[in-house]
Image: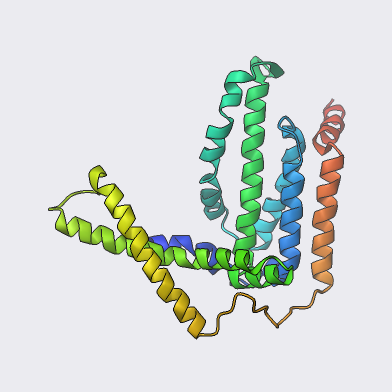
Amino acid sequence: MFDMARTTQTLYTLEQLSAGRSGLHRLHPGVKLIATLFFMVTVISFDRYSLGRIIPFLFYPCILIAWGDIPPALLLRRTAIALPFCLFAGISNLIFERGIAVHLGSFAVTYGLLSLITLLLRTLLCVAAVLILMAVTPMCRLAAQLRRFHIPAIFVSLLEISYRYIAVLMTEASSMYTAYILRSGGAKGIDLKHMGSFVGHLFLRSADRAERVYAAMKCRGYDLDCAPTQRKPVNAADITFLVLVCALCVLFRLADVSAILGAWIVPWKQ
C-alpha cells in the first residue's frame, strides 16, 4: 500500500521534468500561465455538442509535449486519473438524451453519447494543459508569478504549502500504516472498524506536523506577503508564443476548422 520512495517519486515526477532546458522551459512563466488559462477558457466556452470544433484544440498539448520533451505516456497516465470523475458526471446523458445526432454507417450516435465524449475531451485537454504547465515551470516560479499577478497571498500560499505538504502527509500515513500492520498480527490491510480511528489520528498527527513545518518556515524568513524581487524580462520569443497560442485559439473558436477541412478533403478525394 505505501511504497514511499516510489509514491513520492511518482508524485513529483512533473516537478523533476520542470528542470529541463528546452525552449518551452525557458519561456517566461507568466506567459505560459496566461496561455494556459486562455486555452482552457476557450475550450470550456464550447457547448456540450461541439465535439468536432474541439478536436482541433489537440494541437496545443501535442505540440507542447514534443517541444518540451515531456513523456506522453506519463502525461496520459496523469490525465486519465480525472476522466472517471467526468465519466460518472456525464453518464446520465446517455440515459436522458437518446435523440439521434448522427449516423456513422449503421451506428447511431445519440446526443447523450456526443455530449459525454465532448465532456471527456474537454476534461482531457484542460487537465493536460495544467500538467504541461507544471512539467515545464517549477512550482516556485508559478507561485511567484501568481503573486506578481496580485492573486491574494493566502490563496497562493495555500496552493504552494498544500503541494509541498503532500509528501509529509504521505510519510505520516506510511508510518501509521506500518505501525498498524506490526500490531495487527499480519493483517493485509486496515480493518474497516479501525478506519475512523486511523483517519482521526492521521489528521491530528498531520496538524501537529504542519504547525512544526510552518514554524520552521517562519524561522527561515517565510512571509505570506513577501513578493519576489527577481523578475525575468519578457522577450520576443515569449510574446511570439503567447500571440500564436491566443490567435490559434481565437481562430478555432470562431471558425469551424473541422468542417472546413472536411469540405476541402472530400472533393479532393473525389
- Which residue is at a point 54% across and 67% down the rendered structure image? 15
Q: x, y percentage for residue 27?
A: 73, 70
Task: Determine the image quadrant of residue 137.
Answer: bottom right
Residue placed furthest toward the left: 185
Residue placed furthest toward the bottom: 220
- Which residue is at a point 33% across and 59% down the rendered structure image? 202
Task: Determine the image quadrant of residue 53.
Answer: top right
Coloring basis for residues: rainbow
Q: In this view, does 54 lie above or below 205?
A: above
- Front-most of residues 187 and 165: 165
Q: x, y percentage for residue 189?
A: 24, 49
Quarter containing the C terminus: top right
- Which residue is at a point 37% across and 59% down the rendered structure image? 203
Q: x, y percentage for residue 52?
A: 75, 33
Task: Determine the image quadrant of residue 150.
Answer: bottom right
Left or right, 7 with reference to 91: left
Residue 2 seen from this side: no
Q: x, y percentage for residue 66?
A: 66, 58
Q: In this view, does 117 lie above or below 240?
A: above
- Front-most of residues 75 and 265: 75
- Front-most of residues 76 and 192: 192
Left or right, 258 with reference to 97: right
- Which residue is at a point 62% across and 51% down the rendered structure image? 128
Residue 70 seen from this side: yes
Q: Is residue 130 above or below residue 112?
A: below
Q: Is residue 263 above or below residue 98?
A: below
